[in-house]
Image (cartoon, rainbow, N blue to C red):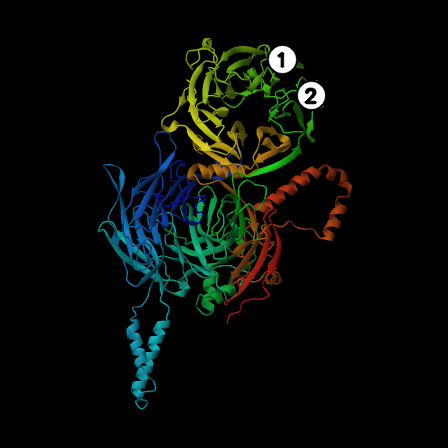
């Protein structure tokens, strides 16, 4: 019998969870001088992520960069930001199903000043029964001064931990928990009050239900037979009264209260200090600044109202309550309540603060406060609520001191916004309501704060595009992913796509995920044959942009010129000095202007210029209209070559001999400097020169790959130059490494300040090696953090070449799939922290070279695929996202395309091997045509639509501008630019908006959609609103 091992499976994460449980903004690394420019996110799957807001003032862009990621094997429940006593940065408190309270600090590494892994400060255990209603951990609150933490369960239990600081070690100490339990109590929310340095107080929104004995009540009710003892009127009346009393008690809704729990630091004891009744529909709270910065207290959000309560305010009587009704949408049913589910308060300075509240429909309101005229400790006497904008429904709203708002969406993408205007209550067209209007209307009518009263007194509005907030950056999310289909439906791509219907309601979409970084195809042209290489060069007149495209074939070279009308063939290339009847091994521009260390152009190195062409029979230098050629001796021919701004290195065919040339600055001529057999009897297969560092005229080292599987680092510094690279002459070997396969290509790339030198080797077996080289000695480093890394890229030999993306150096690796490797830098120190290697979502490229031209909009890639030439550009957003995610989380790099849906997707299937059928449905939703009849257009809702002039307005404008035709014609270009800017602004300011909500009852709206995933359009949409499901 042959023994066979058991089947083993491994779980690999392609894309981490993106659903946000909670979010907090603060200074968690201490690099922002206390400003809230970092965001901690808790995500499903037990993931904790730290993002920083990167402000690039030169490029005028804002991005969210992933700084640190922690994966836990737990179910995370809640988190809170904590500023520990005496600390200068924030920590994070997290509770999970493990029954522990973890206090985490994101510290700096003292060795390299880069952000390190999170540091665990405290981790006490309070329960080990998972997520249960009686186990604390559902709610978490912190004292604003960092002196105590409250961990609460849904029912009964509350624990308070005291945080102290050990004077001897200057470390925080977490004391044993104090109990603040209350039987038969359901907790809805908790928050820490700002009371300065008095005893910490926590506010709890809770309900205490009566003590029922169901078995005893049933027995009593069963024994109450009204038909029995009809003659005994007294007993019958008693039974009837008892019956009514018990039924009334069962139907009575328990009172909901806001209670204050005070921690006495001196006695080490917790007491329930004060409580007051609030709306029975209250669900959320937020603390108001206190302790000298404000009056203190809490804001309570409920259905249709927001109320301010505090221990010193008179909230016992309806006339004394500080409560304000929430404005409503015009098409919202008057009998349907609007629930406030999120409130956040932002302090600006002493006694100056505001609050933002969001409803279940996504409408965001701003609350401002009116104070009494007391000179010291003024109290709140009124509130004003005004509509700000409409955003996706959020789990948390976080406000930064630098004027930004982060919306952690429940479903869909989370977005970082910038406040363009915050004083919305001062606008003459503002939609607002005051607490004085609310209380006076309540007093004059029924005296009850209900939905009918709110609907009768508040102003109404129509939700639209963003007017006061500007989106800056997004975190893409697939939550909730309701289905998945994997297949190569496009027909022209290397890897299959992932088709994921996700979202809810108006935020629903079909996301098409492709592995790799997005690539934009700018042009495709046919070639007369299959090329063997492609290059780009400038004109040789000290221009920064590329002017010519050089395509090498087996026995010829094609020269193309990049002009204003596109790419055209150079008709008289031979007259210009180029060789066209032989293949080109390498070419480039010599004497290209160099930049100094401070970024300015170095005029001393730009006095010489010219173009060099390396072909099998020689090296041709074209300078000042003349062509000088260095030809091979005898029957020898060149096989490989490389060129930088001032140096040329070529190797002979079937030999290990190389020849090294340099550009003589004084005369502008090429000079043969050295010849050496560096292969030690082995044939050379590839050579490369690093770019010349800024302010210099020579690269220090060269790399040579040999057929015997070795790669050698050669010195290019003459011994008389007094170089720090050590003794020896030009082309002397400094170090060598053995490869597991024959090297096919090599690439040396150094950092801008020449502090790092990286050697990349492409092997014949489809793998690539990355090694660190000492930039001074030329030794290949192979230990510790500099150990070589190896990665399989495909089934074809790997070609490695330098490129640029967004002005930063990167590396292209061509195999059976094209890959790009680039470094991730730290936003504060601008130093490299990791390297990301990701594929391009495009067909495999045979040959490629970077190109820089204004004709294609800047940087790009010119490549060949078969007998076609293609000009490509790498999507900057996709590349930045790939660097941000892959460098930190090591997940697969994906980019997505979105197809909007009408309702929540329920199921999908493949039809005919090409089309996708998706069933969409939503409960409590009007149909598409019903919404249009009501005046709500789903196609235009939340979108900024350009105003269309009426016919009369156009005629009046034509009459006024009749004499200014010449002036108008001269401004056609400016008008087109303005139209493009208006279109972009309209796209940026669009926001998802839910339509009118039907009244109580069951309404279903659904449709069946047929999608063509290749062109990403809906081919057919069958509405099923004609057959509504009615409540039986």
Mark number for residue 573?
2
Q: Residue at x 46, y 64 (%)?
A: 440
- Residue 1005 in the image: x percent, y percent? 55, 62
Seen in the picture, residue 267 relative to 877 is either above or below; the reply is below
How many residues crowd mark 1 within 10 Å: few (<14), some (14–19), many (20+)? some
Would you say residue 501 is visible in this rendering?
A: yes
- Residue 712 in the image: x percent, y percent? 45, 19
Q: Secondary structure at mark 2?
A: loop
According to the image, label 1 marks what residue?
629
Q: Secondary structure at mark 1?
A: strand
Seen in the picture, residue 880 relative to 675 is either above or below; the reply is below
How many residues crowd mark 2 within 10 Å: few (<14), some (14–19), many (20+)? some
Q: As drawn, which residue projects farthest toward the front?
A: 1
The residue closer to the viewer here, 39 or 842, is: 842
Q: Are marks 1 and 2 in contact (CB under 8 Å)?
A: no
Would you say residue 468 is visible in this rendering?
A: no
- Residue 907 in the image: x percent, y percent? 52, 56
Q: Earlier in the sequence, mark 1 or mark 2?
A: 2
Apparent side of residue 812 relative to residue 582 in the rendered image (left or right): left
């Amino acid at each position: 019998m042959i023994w066979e091992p058991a089947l083993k499976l491994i779980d690999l994460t392609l894309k981490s969870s993106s659903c946000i449980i909670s979010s907090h903004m603060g200074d968690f690394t201490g690099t922002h001088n206390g400003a809230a420019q970092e965001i901690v996110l808790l995500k499903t799957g037990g993931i904790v992520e730290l993002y920083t807001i990167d402000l690039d003032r030169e490029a005028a862009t804002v991005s969210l960069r992933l700084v640190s990621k922690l994966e836990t094997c737990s179910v995370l429940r809640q988190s809170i930001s904590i500023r520990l006593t005496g600390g200068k940065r924030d920590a994070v408190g997290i509770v999970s199903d493990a029954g522990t309270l973890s206090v985490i600090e994101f510290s700096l590494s003292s060795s390299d000043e880069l952000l390190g892994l999170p540091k665990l400060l405290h981790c006490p255990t309070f329960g080990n029964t998972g997520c249960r209603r009686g186990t604390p951990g559902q709610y978490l609150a912190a004292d604003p001064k960092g002196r105590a933490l409250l961990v609460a369960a849904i029912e009964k239990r509350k624990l308070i931990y005291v945080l102290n600081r050990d004077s001897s070690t200057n470390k925080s100490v977490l004391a044993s928990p104090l109990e603040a339990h209350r039987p038969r109590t359901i907790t809805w929310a908790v928050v820490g009050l700002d009371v300065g340095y008095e005893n910490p107080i926590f506010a709890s929104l809770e309900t205490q239900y009566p003590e029922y004995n169901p078995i005893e009540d049933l027995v009593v009710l069963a024994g109450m037979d009204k038909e029995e003892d009809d003659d005994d009127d007294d007993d019958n009346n008693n039974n009837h009264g008892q019956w009514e009393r018990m039924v009334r008690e069962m139907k009575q809704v328990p009172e909901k209260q806001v209670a204050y729990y005070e921690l006495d630091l001196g006695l080490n004891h917790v007491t329930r200090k004060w409580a007051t009744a609030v709306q029975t529909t209250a669900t959320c709270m937020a603390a108001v600044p206190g302790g000298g910065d404000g009056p203190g207290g809490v804001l309570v959000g409920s259905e249709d109202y927001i109320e301010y309560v505090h221990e010193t305010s008179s909230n016992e009587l309806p006339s004394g309550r500080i409560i304000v009704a929430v404005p409503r949408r015009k098409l919202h049913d008057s009998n349907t309540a609007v629930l406030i589910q999120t409130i956040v308060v932002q302090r600006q300075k002493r006694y100056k603060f505001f609050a933002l509240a969001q409803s279940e429909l996504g409408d965001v309101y701003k609350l401002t406060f009116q104070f009494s005229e007391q000179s010291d400790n003024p109290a709140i006497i009124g509130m004003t609520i005004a509509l700000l904008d409409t955003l996706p429904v959020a789990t948390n709203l976080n406000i930064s001191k630098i004027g930004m708002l982060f919306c952690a969406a429940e479903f869909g993408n989370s977005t970082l916004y910038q406040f363009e205007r915050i004083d919305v209550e001062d606008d003459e067209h503002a939609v607002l309501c005051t607490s004085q209007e609310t209380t006076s209307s309540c007093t004059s009518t029924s005296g009850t704060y209900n939905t009918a009263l709110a609907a009768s007194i508040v102003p109404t509005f129509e939700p639209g595009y963003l007017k006061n907030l500007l989106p800056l950056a997004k975190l893409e999310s697939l939550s909730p992913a309701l289905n998945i289909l994997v297949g190569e439906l496009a027909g022209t791509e290397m890897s299959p796509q992932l088709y994921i219907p996700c979202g809810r309601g108006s935020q629903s979409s079909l996301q098409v995920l492709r592995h790799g970084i997005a690539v934009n195809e700018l042009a495709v042209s046919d070639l007369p044959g299959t090329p063997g290489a492609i290059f780009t060069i400038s004109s040789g007149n000290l221009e920064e942009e590329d002017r010519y495209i050089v395509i090498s074939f087996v026995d010829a070279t094609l020269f193309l010129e990049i002009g204003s009308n596109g790419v055209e063939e150079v008709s008289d290339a031979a007259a210009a000095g180029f060789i066209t009847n032989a293949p080109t091994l390498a070419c480039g521009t010599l004497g290209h202007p160099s930049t100094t260390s401070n970024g300015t152009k170095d005029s001393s190195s730009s006095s010489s210029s010219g173009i060099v062409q390396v072909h099998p029979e020689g090296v041709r230098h074209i300078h000042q209209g003349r062509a000088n050629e260095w030809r091979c001796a005898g029957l020898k021919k060149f096989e490989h070559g490389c060129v930088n701004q001032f140096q040329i290195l070529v190797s002979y065919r079937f030999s290990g001999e190389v020849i090294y040339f340099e550009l003589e600055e004084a005369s502008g001529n090429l000079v043969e400097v050295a010849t050496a057999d560096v292969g030690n009897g082995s044939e050379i297969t590839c050579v490369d020169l690093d770019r010349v560092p800024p302010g210099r005229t020579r690269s220090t080292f060269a790399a040579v790959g040999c057929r015997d599987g070795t790669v050698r680092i050669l010195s290019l510094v003459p011994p008389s130059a007094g170089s720090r690279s050590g003794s020896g002459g030009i082309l002397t070997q400094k170090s060598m490494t053995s490869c597991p396969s024959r090297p096919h290509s090599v690439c040396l790339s150094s950092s801008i300040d020449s502090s790092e030198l990286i050697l990349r080797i492409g092997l014949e077996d489809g793998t690539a090696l990355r090694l660190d080289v000492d930039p001074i000695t030329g030794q290949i480093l192979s230990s510790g953090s500099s150990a070589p890394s190896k990665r399989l890229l495909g089934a074809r030999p790997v070609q490695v070449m330098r490129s640029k993306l967004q002005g930063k150096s990167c590396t292209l690796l061509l195999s059976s799939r094209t890959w790009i490797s680039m470094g991730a830098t730290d936003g504060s120190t601008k130093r490299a922290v990791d390297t990301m290697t990701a594929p391009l979502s495009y067909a495999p490229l045979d040959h490629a070279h970077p190109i820089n031209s204004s004709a294609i909009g800047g940087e790009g890639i010119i490549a060949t695929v078969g007998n076609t030439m293609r000009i490509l550009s790498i999507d900057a957003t996709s590349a930045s996202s790939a660097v941000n995610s892959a460098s930190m989380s090591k997940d697969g790099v994906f980019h997505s395309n979105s197809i909007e849906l009408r309702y929540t997707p329920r199921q999908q299937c493949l039809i005919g091997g090409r089309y996708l059928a998706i069933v969409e449905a939503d409960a409590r939703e009007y149909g598409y045509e019903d919404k249009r009849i009501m005046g709500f257009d789903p196609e235009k809702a939340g979108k900024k639509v350009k105003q269309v002039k009426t016919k009369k307005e156009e005629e009046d404008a034509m009459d006024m501008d009749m004499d200014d035709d010449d002036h108008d014609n001269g401004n056609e270009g400016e008008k087109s630019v303005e139209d493009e800017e208006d279109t972009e602004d309209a796209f940026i300011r669009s926001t998802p908006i839910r339509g009118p909500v039907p009244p109580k009852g069951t309404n279903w709206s659904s449709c069946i959609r047929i999608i063509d995933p290749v062109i990403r359009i809906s081919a057919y949409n069958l509405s099923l609103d004609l057959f509504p499901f009615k409540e039986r």
